[in-house]
Image (spheres, grey):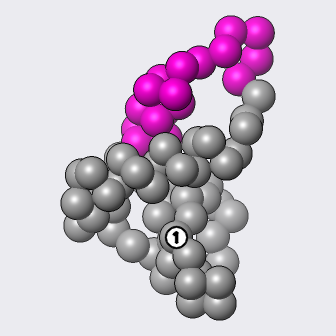
Amino acid sequence: MIIPWQQVEPDTLLNLIESFVLREGTDYGELEKTLEQKVQDVKRQLERGEALLVWSELHETVNIMPKEMFRP
């Protein structure tokens, strides 16, 4: 189920994004980004609709994923 990120309290959204960024360990190329930069990148992706905030009923967890990977 998609959770509209706009309806999530700002502090909660920040915590969800930080948790996601810390779990992912994505390679950002030659220049390593700070946690704050990574969080802002993910927030921009949510704002542009490129990423979704998704609730998994099976796992009872919230995750962030690219829009094209979401399967209802």
Could you tell me residue 54's position as x and y percent? Answer: 51, 71
The quarter of the picture where residue 61 lies is: bottom right
Please say if 72 is above or below 63: below
* Between 61 and 3, the one nearer to me in the picture: 61
Q: Residue at x 60, y 58 (%)?
A: 65
Question: What is the span of residues highlighted in magenta in the rendered image?
Answer: 28-45
Classify the position of the C terminus by image quarter.
Answer: bottom right
User: Position of 19 compared to 68: left or right?
Assistant: left
Q: Determine if residue 30 is in view.
A: yes
Residue 2 vertical placement versus 26 (above, below): below
Q: Is residue 65 above or below residue 1?
A: above
The percent position of residue 37, horizontal first and vertical second, equals: 47, 24
Residue 45, can we see it? Answer: no
Dominant SS of magenta comes to helix
Residue picked out by circle 1: 62
Q: Position of residue 52 (x, y in %)?
A: 49, 61
- Amino acid type indicated by mark 1: Val
Instruction: Rate crowding at label 1 as few (under 14), some (14 to 19) or many (20 or more) other CA atoms within 10 Å.
Output: some
- Of 44 and 61, the residue lying toward us: 61
Q: Is residue 72 left or right of residue 44?
A: right
Dot 1 lies on which element?
strand
- In the image, residue 8 sits, relative to residue 29, either above or below, namely below
Magenta highlight on residue 35: yes
